[in-house]
Image (cartoon, grey):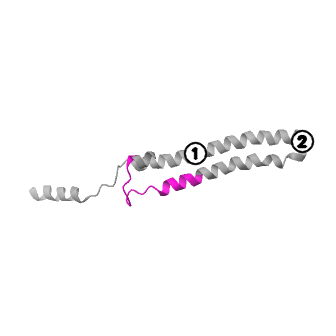
Amino acid sequence: LSDQIQSLQQLAMSSTFNGDETAPFFGFLGAAAALVFSCMGAAYGTAKSGVGVASMGVMRPELVMKSIVPVVMAGVLGIYGLIIAVIISTGINPKAKSYYLFDGYA
């Protein structure tokens, strides 16, 4: 029995603790939130500018191509969110370095 207790103590002592166990959850949650909210904003901007393009096509058809710029800018917002989500998710590696709750929230 004492051999089993000693082996369990050695097992507990040998395991390394690199930060908090729930911190990667919050890190990945932040990456997902960055992606979701930026894409929702891009969709909203595309819808609003699409209405403007449609009304511009009725009122002044010669300026339709100039009114495409807001649609493109709204689409770029979703790409920026994807870039930020990739940057956040590549920084989450609890095996390589300590990853604490501060890192998950930041």
Q: Quadrant of residue 41?
A: top right
Res. 82 mark: none
Of residues 105 and 38, the one nearer the viewer is 105
Mark 1 highlights which residue?
Answer: 36
Q: Is residue 24 a member of the stretch shown in magenta?
A: no
Question: Whole-percent x and y of residue 106?
Answer: 46, 47
Q: What residue is shown at x 54% (from left), y 55% (from top)?
A: 86
- In the image, taking residue 53 as reference, residue 74 lies left or right, namely left
Instruction: Categorize mark 1 by other alpha carbons within 10 Å: few (<14), some (14-19), many (20+).
Output: some
Instruction: Categorize mark 2 by other alpha carbons within 10 Å: few (<14), some (14-19), many (20+).
Output: few
Question: Whole-percent x and y of residue 84?
Answer: 56, 52
Q: Which residues are magenta?
A: 82-101
Res. 60 mark: 2
- In the image, taking residue 77 as reference, residue 27 lies left or right, namely left
Secondary structure, mark 1, is: helix
Question: Whole-percent x and y of residue 62?
Answer: 90, 47
Secondary structure, mark 2, is: loop
Marks 2, 1: nearer the viewer: 2
Q: What residue is shown at x 28% (from left), y 58% (from top)?
A: 16
- In the image, taking residue 78 as reference, residue 24 lies left or right, namely left
